Image (spheres, rainbow, N blue to C red):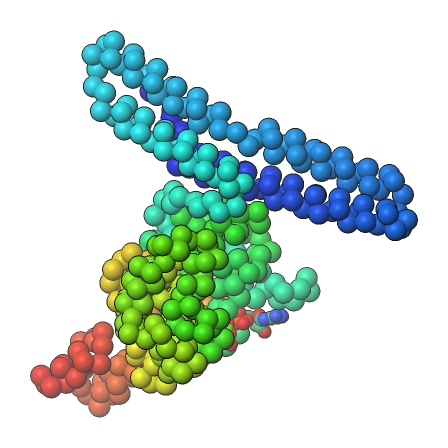
Amino acid sequence: MAKFLTASDLNEFKLLINEYRDKLNRSGQKLVVAKAKYSKKEVELEFVQRYETEYRENKAKYKANAHTKKFVDNINLVKTKISKAKANNSDLTELLTELQTAKQLLKDARFSLRDKGNSAELSKINKVALKLEDIKFRYKDDFPFAVDGVSVEVKHGEYVAIIGHNGSGKSTLSKIIIGVLKPTSGAIAVYGNRVTSSNLSVIRKFMGIVFQNPDNQFIGSTVKDDIAFGLENRRVEPADMEEIIQKAAKKVNMHEFLDHEPLMLSGGQKQRVAIASALALSPDIMIFDEATSMLDPKGKTEVKNIMVELKNTREKTIFSITHDMDEILNADKVMVMNAGQLVKFGTPSEILSDKNFLRSIHLDIPFVAQVEEALEEVGLKLEHSESLEELVERICQK
Ligand SMILES: Nc1ncnc2c1ncn2[C@@H]1O[C@H](COP(=O)(O)OP(=O)(O)OP(=O)(O)O)[C@@H](O)[C@H]1O
Ligand SMILES: [Mg+2]
């Protein structure tokens, strides 16, 4: 059967439009600057003409690509196949589904054209939320690599904790993942979409981020305004906002605080609001950058519980950069960073099975594991426990 277009072709189309639009905007700005310089007699006419040519070329490129012909052709191709199949009395089911898909692709392509590729949203081409291939980064040419050849694949729905001693490259890596820093070399794909410098803003829509300091994350004068802010930025219909805000606030158990002033909340509550603000934009990936490190024990527990609840829905992929070794027990997988390298990637029990290794790279071990070890030293060997409750239970049974 002839190959029909897929979501991946639509993504490529969106990215291309975005890229050409971006180039066109930039050369437009350069032209304005050149003209201003010319009017102040700072440059020759030739200088302006050069930018005029560049602008015209970019405009031509944009026009040559900014049309939906291939999506229309695609529908016609499906229709031709359907007529043939009808003539041969073959099964039409599959082709009719293809027709639906082809129509939807055209609709989406038209939408993103109208939008000039700006608010385009990419589809998930596969279930790998994040794929890093040999990522390297250094802050300056003669500096050592702060991230030194990290490769990893994380599936949708997983909760991944990133740990490592101070200076091991966790923050640098998270900045690369959210697109704040551009890797010196290596490739990144988010749900199968290769990240490039021209599609960063579109890729970022997959992600929601909660930072360390609860006080630096507020803009609105009430909790509700704060959650609404991100939605307004995304130009969500005002009529839809109320429901989205309520739902997000409920997920973090802050729905009764919508009219409260953010500054009056406790640290844990503030972080929960920050989580709600991120969730309201329905990201597929949530990144917690030491989100519990500045909280008191109660706040820490509150936020960690929300993270576990989120994990249990399996609707989001979660990355949590943390110094809290107890938190890693909640994760499905743990990335252990040392001197810019990913030295281990495995389940919490795999990681914890080599306590001496963790110590050798200056990491603590979780409280539960410390108690187990201490008990073993005095001759009480217990099966490994995942939580403090489980451990207490095991001790009581002895
Ligand atoms: N802006 C910068 N300019 C130059 N070097 C930097 C910069 N930020 C970090 N580094 C260096 O890069 C390396 C990795 O730092 P990074 O902040 O990523 O580590 P980290 O694991 O997040 O540490 P911490 O646990 O202390 O937050 C360190 O050697 C650090 O000194
Ligand atoms: Mg850091």
Can the viewer see residue 332 in this picture? no
The image quadrant where one finds the C terminus is bottom left
Relative to residue 17, is residue 84 drawn left or right?
left
The residue at the far front in this view is: 239
At 49% across and 75% down in the image, what residue appears?
216
Give percent across and percent down for residue 227: 40, 66
Could you say which quadrant of the image residue 348 lies in? bottom left
> Foreground: 67 or 287?
67
Vertical position of residue 398 compared to residue 241: above or below: below
The residue at the far top in this view is: 87
> Foreground: 393 or 293?
293
Vertical position of residue 153 compared to residue 289: above or below: above
The residue at the far left in this view is: 397
Relative to residue 197, is residue 37 drawn left or right?
right
Can the viewer see residue 376 in this picture? yes
Give percent across and percent down for residue 293: 42, 79
Give percent across and percent down for residue 198: 57, 47
